[in-house]
Image (spheres, helix red, strand yellow):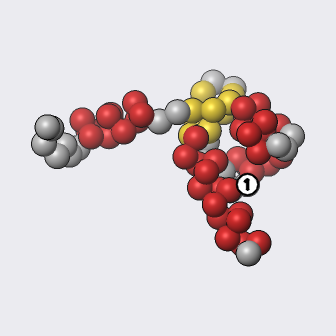
């Protein structure tokens, strides 16, 4: 069993576990257009990382956004 890690090693391990999705994958998952995903990213509603000229969205960010959207409509 591993001890509790802190600092850069802990951050590196967490980043390696993150699954990044393309804008097209996010759009398909949410059943919206790619333009809608771009609007959410540019508006700051959906967290994304810029890689060159494209964006990658952490899968957990999509789930967090959808969870928030459900609680707003309920």
Left or right relative to 51: residue 53 = right
Q: Position of residue 61 (x, y in %)?
A: 58, 48
Who's the residue at 24% across and 35% down the image?
Answer: 9
* Quarter of the figure with the N terminus: top left
Number of labels in the image equals 1
Determine the image quadrant of residue 43.
bottom right
Q: Residue at x 74, y 39 (%)?
A: 29
Q: Nearer the viewer, residue 29 or 9?
A: 29
Question: Residue 53, located in which quarter of the rendered image?
Answer: top right
* Residue at 65 percent of width and 56 percent of height: 65
In-image side of 20 versus 37 (left or right): left
Q: Is residue 6 above or below residue 45?
A: above
As drawn, 47 above or below 74: above
Which element is circle 1 on? loop
Does residue 6 sit above or below 49 in this rendering? below
**Residue at left offset 68%, top offset 30%:** 22
If the image is split into quadrants, where does the C terminus sit?
A: bottom right
Front residue (pair 8, 71): 71
Residue 38 seen: no
Single out the residue that lies furthest toward the bottom: 74
Instruction: Say whether residue 63 is visible.
Output: yes
Where in the figure is residue 20, as x and y percent of width and height? 57, 32
Give the percent coordinates (x, y) of residue 50.
61, 34
Neighbour tally class for label 1: few under 14, some 14-19, many 20 plus, Cα within 10 Å:
few
Residue at far front of view: 1
Q: Is residue 61 left or right of residue 33?
A: left
**Would you identify the image quadrant in which residue 72 lies?**
bottom right
Where 29 falls versus 71 (above or below)?
A: above
Residue denoted by label 1: 43
Question: Residue 52: horizontal and vertical position, in percent?
Answer: 63, 24
């Amino acid at each position: 069993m591993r001890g509790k890690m802190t600092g850069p090693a802990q951050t590196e391990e967490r980043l390696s576990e993150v699954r990044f999705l393309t804008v097209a994958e996010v759009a398909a998952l949410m059943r919206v257009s790619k333009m809608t995903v771009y609007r959410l990213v540019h508006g700051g509603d959906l967290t994304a990382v810029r890689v060159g000229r494209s964006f990658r969205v952490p899968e957990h960010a999509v789930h967090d956004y959808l969870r928030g959207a459900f609680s707003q409509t309920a």
